[in-house]
Amino acid sequence: MLEAGYGVGLLDNIVAAPYLRQGLIQSVLPEWLATPKPYFLVLPYRQPMPKKYEAFIQFVVPRLQARLSQSMN
């Protein structure tokens, strides 16, 4: 609904950044920031950890970190 021009919302930077860059939404209170929230990967507990989980973590964590640092700029 925000993209359609209806209302005001509070979005994480990682979610809002592409819409802001494209001009689909605009920041109305840029000096007001929400408290940063952590991101978690939730996986079933298994010992030893299956290789597919290790591969997924090695794939997704650096990409998520890069996206988060880009969205903060």
Image: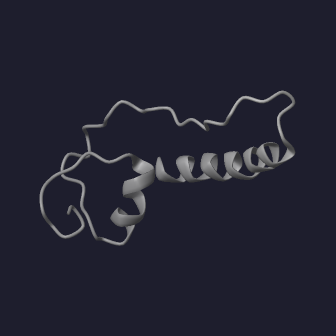
Residue under the image location 57 percent in, 35 percent down: 40
Residue 73 visible in this rendered orientation of the protein? no
Residue 30 placement, left or right of 59: left
* Vertical position of residue 48 compared to residue 22: above or below: above
Number of labels in the image equals 0
Q: Is residue 22 left or right of residue 71?
A: left
Residue 9 drawn at (x, y percent): 21, 49
Location of residue 57 in the rendering, given as x and y in whole percent from the top left corner: 73, 44
Where residue 11 appears, as percent x and y from the top left, is: 32, 48
Q: Is residue 43 above or below residue 16?
A: above
Residue at (21% x, 61% y) in the render: 2
Q: Nearer the viewer, residue 48 or 28?
A: 48
**Quick one: 60 or 45, which is closer to the camera?**
45
Q: Residue at x 24, y 61 (%)?
A: 26
Instruction: Please tell me whether residue 64 is drawn above or below residue 1 in the rendered image.
Output: above
- Colour option used: one colour
Quarter of the rendering occupied by the N terminus? bottom left
Looking at the picture, how far across and down is residue 6, in whole percent? Answer: 12, 63
Residue 6 left/right relative to 55: left
Residue 37's image quarter? top left
Along the line of sight, the residue nearer the viewer: 55 or 63: 55
**Residue shown at 36%/30% (left/top)?**
35
Between 5 and 55, the one nearer to me in the picture:
55
Tell me if I can see residue 71 in this picture. Answer: yes
Looking at this rendering, what residue extends furthest in the left direction? 7
The quarter of the displayed image where residue 3 is located: bottom left
